Amino acid sequence: MGDNFNLVLEKIFGINPDSDNDEILKKLDNEIKSEKRINTFVHKNEDENEIVINFSPDENTNKITNLCIAAGLPNDDFDRAEKIYKSIVKEAGNDYNYTLQGVANTGSYAQYAGIMAEGSVNNQQVLTYNSYGLKSFTEFNGNEFLGYKIGILYYLNGAFSKNLGSIQIYNELVNEGVINKGNISGRYRSGDTIKTSNMKAVIFKILNRLLELDESEVEELVENHFNPLIVERKMRFIDKYQQYLNNNGDYLINYIMSYNIPARLFPHIGSSYFVDASLKQSESGISPALMNRIEELEEDRLDSLINPHYECFQPYVLLKAGANGETALNRSGSKPQIGNICSNVSLDYLKALVKDIVLDLEKKDKDILKKLFRYHRIQGSSAMLEVIKDRLRYSMFLQKKTAEYNLYKSEYFKENRDLFNENDKIYLLDEAVLEQLESRMSKEELNQLYQWELTGEGIFLILCGKEESEDENSGKQDDSIIEYHGSDSKQKFDNSEERLKLESNEPSRNRIYGSSRQGRYIEELDNEYLLKDEDAYQFNNSQGAGFEILSENTSPERKIKIDGRDISIEY
């Protein structure tokens, strides 16, 4: 593993894997003894007969739980999660539909609580977001019988002392009849508890064979480190998980961002989906492409691959019919229902992102609006979108998702290659958004992302424009402000409407804006713009920029109207 990957592991686990054993043991001792707390937020919806339980970590939660999950050692946090859920169900009753939710390691709490309630809660669903998977809890490995510190140490280093390996311990436990069919055998358990004295005796016997230690040292090792609670939690979890599989359970759902290292590093139980890759089913493990990114990124960029970024899921939630585009599907490949995670980000999010990119460009290039308008006039309505897509490509380059070679497609960025540098803003969903813009959106949807408006007051670029309601008294629709990526000041942007005025030359009476025609004007063929009875030209500002009146048949003395408003004096 490279230096960056070791740094990533240190950020996740709080421990440098390259540290010596004594240093790791000291660090683990401090972490394990520190006080931890799980917060839950419960929302009861009587109309829908639903109770939603969100698991949330305490601000001071340390990273020992992450290590315990990786090493397959259920700690006290999971007991707390189980008890919290059971107490809520006991108080509210079993007639509700329960939804458990969590992010990162709190998603692991939600899954643990859900599995431990298998068979006792009638209707439940567990939704996790960039969660740490619990596959390590579904089978014994051998290190569970060594306690937290030594069990974790083995996970990190691969060895505790001479000739000690979890595989050897596991095989010996099978040979001694402690483990049968992947779980604790009936000889060493009584219901949900283990026969501690019997198990300690056989563990002493096994370690005495495997370790080059005196019997007194082995006895001290077992007395000081064997923790029956770890074994019992895992034993009960395996029981319940097997029951879940036997019942064809389908209520464990993991939503994952494909770039999130912890969500990829910890194998999952249940069904898992890459939200930023059209909800295709996810694969466990760090892909070669992601590993290359990890090693190529600068240290200050690594956090973007580690943080759970729960807010990145927000744009994928369907808030109203059609809001995420006509091609949006849910995880089952069907038309999504309100509240579903979709394969597309919403059009509202795309509009807000376009606005953020344009405003950022405007800070760097004072003539950007003129250039965008020129591209729009000469190349068509999609020309500005190519600039937006190039900015997303540059964000991908900063995150090592793509090479610099042949990076830009638009004329603007080809002419302004030095406009950005490595310190500029990244967009976490850049690749997913770019793919959606290029392959899953209709022309009509793309045209909604921004509008040029030509009026008597001037030329405006409308960003995050709000549609007028059909009810004249209700004003504009969707006038609530939504902030995206709000927890990160460097990432956040919102969907508030922005009207940017193009600073242009004084208008000429010999130039008409508002026409969809691009060719030379011929009055005899004009059955669209000329109002002979009023001796005026009539245009609609939604038609885009028009043409110059060059024909000898046109009269600059005629009135000019846009949307019925006479602008002759201004023009």
Image (cartoon, helix red, strand yellow):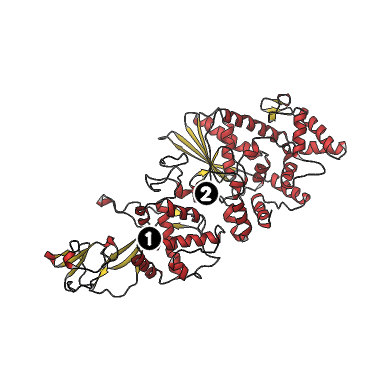
Q: Quadrant of the C terminus?
A: bottom left
Label 1 neighbourhood size at 10 Å, few (<14), some (14-19), many (20+)?
Answer: few
Q: Residue at x 27, y 61 (%)?
A: 543
| Res 500 visible | no
| Residue 453 x %, y % | 31, 63
Label 2 neighbourhood size at 10 Å, few (<14), some (14-19), many (20+)?
Answer: some
Q: Nearer the viewer, residue 493 or 323?
A: 323
Q: Can you identify the residue that label 1 sits on?
A: 382
The amino acid beneath tag 2 is Tyr
| Residue 216 x %, y % | 87, 37
Q: Is residue 446 above or below residue 218?
A: below
Tell how many labels.
2
Q: Nearer the viewer, residue 47 or 451?
A: 451
Q: Can you identify the residue that label 2 sits on?
A: 310
Q: Is residue 544 left or right of residue 351?
A: left
Q: CA distance from mark 1 to mark 2?
A: 32 Å
Q: Is residue 26 above or below residue 295?
A: above
Secondary structure at badge 2 equals helix
| Residue 188 x %, y % | 73, 26
Q: Is residue 523 left or right of residue 498?
A: left
Closer mark to the observer between disc 1 and disc 2: 1
